[in-house]
Image: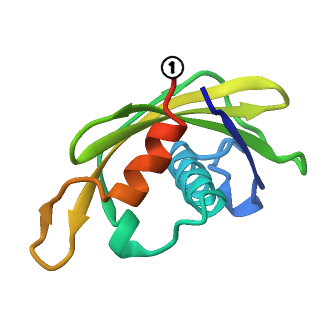
Amino acid sequence: MTVFDIEVAKRFKDLDPYDHVSNSVVIDYIMEARVRVYRQWALSDRSVIGQVVARQEIDYRRPIEFDLEPLVVRSWVSHVGDSSFTMDFQVMDHGAVAADAKSVMVCFDVQSRKSRSIPDEFRSKLLEHLEA
C-alpha cells in the first residue's frame, strides 16, 4: 500500500469558540491532502481528474488544538470502481490520530453533468497506489 504523508498547517482562523480546530475545517485539511497527492502524481488536468465528492465520513478521535506544529494527513487509495474510487485518511496531530476519514469520489463530466468512467490515465495512478 502506498501511504502519502502530507503536512498541512493549522491556521488560527480554523479555531472554534472552544479553541479547538473546528470539525468543519478537518474536511478542508483532507481536501488539501487529496489535491496534493494528485500533484505528486503530476495530474492537474480537470478533464482527467474531474470529480465530485459523493460521500464523506469522518470519525473525530481527539480535539486538535492550535500550535505551530503542522498536522500530517496520511492518505491512501482503498477502492477503485468503474466511475468511483475511495481514499482513506488519518489526520495526525503530534503523532496521534485526531480523525479517521473516508472520501468516496465519483468522476464527473462537466458537460453532461453526469458520472463517467475513471479516465485511463487517472485509473492507472489509482491502481498503482491501491491498498493491497
Can you give x and y, in whole percent of width and height, for residue 89 in the image? 56, 34
Classify 2 as above or below 61. Answer: below
On screen, residue 39 versus residue 131, left or right, reads right
Q: Is residue 55 visible?
A: no
Residue at 52% from the left image edge and 54% from the top image edge = 31
Residue at 53% from the left image edge and 66% from the top image edge = 43
Count of numbered marks: 1
Quadrant of residue 76 within the rendered picture:
top right
Return the residue found at the far bottom.
111
Q: Residue 85 versus residue 103: which sits nearer the camera?
A: 85
Q: How is the image coloured?
A: rainbow
Q: Secondary structure at mark 1?
A: loop
Q: Residue 77 versus residue 19: which sits nearer the camera?
A: 77
Image quarter in which the N terminus is found: top right
Can you give x and y, in whole percent of width and height, for residue 54 in the image? 26, 47
Quadrant of residue 78 within the rendered picture:
top left
Residue at mark 1 = 132
Residue at 20% from the left image edge and 75% from the top image edge = 110
On screen, residue 67 versus residue 88, left or right, reads right
Q: Residue 18 versus residue 39: which sits nearer the camera?
A: 39
Q: Is residue 6 visible?
A: yes
Classify 46 as above or below 71. Answer: below
Quadrant of residue 119 within the rendered picture:
bottom left
Q: Residue 52 versus residue 28: which sits nearer the camera?
A: 52
- Label 1: few (<14), some (14–19) or many (≥20) C-alpha neighbours in 10 Å: few
Residue at 66% from the left image edge and 33% from the top image edge = 3
Can you give x and y, in whole percent of width and height, for residue 95 in the image? 82, 26
Can you give x and y, in whole percent of width and height, for residue 33 in the image? 61, 51
Q: What's the residue type where badge 1 is placed?
A: Ala
